[in-house]
Amino acid sequence: MALAFVRTLTGAAVALAFGLAASSAASAAEKVSIRLKWVAQAQFAGIYVAKAKGFYADAGLDATINPGGPNINVETLVASGADTFGIASGTEGMLYSREKGLPLVCVGMSQQMTPFAFVTYDSSGIKSVKDFKGKKVAVWFTGVQYTLYSVMAHEGLSQKDAQIIAQPFSMQPFIDKQYDVATVTLYNELNTLKEQGINNIRLFMPDDSGVTTQQDALVTSEKMIKEKPEQVQAFVTATLKGWKYAFEHKSEAVDIVMAAGAGLERKHQELMLDEIQRVMTAKLGGSEGLGAIDMKAVSDVQDSLVKFEALKKPVDLKAAFDSSFWAKVPAADKKL
Amino acid sequence: MKRDALLRSPLPMLVVLALAWWLVVPALKIEARYLPPLGAVIADARSVWPDLLAGFWRTLLETVIGFFIGAALGIAAGIGFAQWRWLERGVFPIFVALQSVPVIAFGAIVVIWFGNTLASKVVIALYLAFFPIAVNTLRGLQEADPQRMALMRSFGASSRQMFLKLSLPTALPTIMIGLKIGLSLALAGAIVGEWFGDTVGLGVMLLQALYFEQVPRLWVLILTCGGLGTLLYGGAGLIERRFIWWRAE
């Protein structure tokens, strides 16, 4: 009885969804949704700015921004068509999604250098990655562990040389010196440490060891690329325009982000935007423009994932990464 | 009389706890990351007051809507199960299986179906509230004294009369227990539901506080969520005392 009711309810919801889809096709602006990998914050300033300044609307997109969370898998939502576009994990996440057979395509990469770093206290005696040998190294097992393995491999260490442990959500165990090395993102945990007055630390950047993994991939589905390439183009162009505007009008961009989220601290968001700008304009982001896909870095990451048997076999990079939309974005919209 | 009523209420204990928090933290030099001073927590609450209020209303709304739909479905299912044994045998095990699916796994599907709407949080709240209400309704309806049933039947009472005059009144206190459990679970469901992506709500603020490691904010949210839960539970208790004053036998 109740089950029948639930079924009716689901049926009604599906009917409603179809109804909405049908009505949107008739209107001028196309309804699209953009799924973020986390809740509203300066990490996604460009998207919020593009929406608030009307860049999406001007490009003919009626965009809804859907924030993410710890239980949200952007890759699945975009590949299934539940969301039109997404800001998904990054190089590793793209490769795993393709290996699993998800029809997901990366059309741009936000962060140009590895946004993760490994951090230790000055007093730990660790002066280089080589000194990780025999130490307790904490890393998030969300894919970042492979960046650590690659960095160690590039420095001549094997995974077994260090005692690698899973790092929790909080930086507290590192503050309490429960392990020697911890992982941070340059735009959040590092700021958290600094705000708590912890400055006696040394950073090891994966890029310095020759390991680059790009993060915050702009993704869409194969279906979108096939059926509505003009919308994909509009999304890529307007998003990059949003980022350029955000970096050129930072205070306004922070205002827009603050209005989109609940209970955000302005100072946090300002620091985050500064760091996001640094990682987005590094390397190709500076020379080629915002959002460039570093195919050399992608193929290097793939090689090391295959070596560590995190990927069973290489995936077709040409099908997984499509730079053609990015290439058509006018230089004025992507170069600072 | 009035003083007695005040003493019996939880208010004095709350004042004692607050005073203890206020005095003990600086006295024992407890580090802020373990337990921030009460003043810091209050100051933090004041600094995000509008967001906190908006979050409170949003989470309350999700909980209440989810709870009412869950309660309606749960009571209906319970009555159905009590009425038709074959339904209980056929459907109840499926509900038990559904109930054992972690809400996290179920939630991912809910987001695909309902997107980032209020509906997706309502559905998760409903999903958690439904089961205890259905089970308690069923158990309550099975509690009616068979001798009284036989007596009523011998006087020619219809099944409708027996249900309204005997089974349902006997079951109401037990159903009420289910409703109170369901209410608490609906709140948990609404908060977890917000972790599947949203911009307003106590769950969203909790997530941000965790991510930025804002310990005073965490305490603000713990207290607010606790307050919301107490308010809902208290409201249910009030209704129970007013309308269902008799006890289960």
Image (spheres, coloured by chain):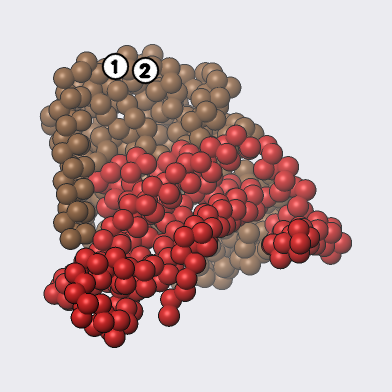
Apparent colour of chain B: red
Residue sitting nearer the eye, B168 or A59: B168
**Which labelled disc corresponds to residue A59?**
1
Name the chain under label 2: A
Q: Quadrant of the C terminus of chain B?
A: bottom left
Task: Classify 10 Å Cα crowding around label 1: few (below 14), some (14-19), many (20 and above).
Answer: some
Instruction: Decide if residue A228 is on the left or right side of residue A48.
Output: left
Residue A214 vs residue A33: left or right?
right
Q: Residue at x 32, y 26 (%)?
A: A63
Chain A visual colour: brown
The amino acid pointed to by label 1 is Ala
Cβ atoms at labels 2 and 1 below 8 Å apart: yes
Q: In the picture shown, does residue B20 fall above or below A61?
A: below
Q: Secondary structure at mark 1?
A: loop
Picture residue at 69% right of the left edge, 43% below the top: B44
For residue A108, say whether it is visible: no
Q: Is residue A174 above or below residue A200?
A: below
Say which element carries label 2: helix
Task: From the viewer's perspective, tell me whether residue A307 is left or right of residue B16.
Answer: left
Amino acid type, callout 2: Phe
Q: How dense is the environment of label 2, judged by Cα within 10 Å: few (below 14), some, or many (20 and up)?
A: many
Which of the 4 quarters of the picture holds residue B88?
bottom left
Q: In what quadrant of the picture does the N terminus of chain B appear?
A: bottom right
Give the residue pinned by disc 2: A55
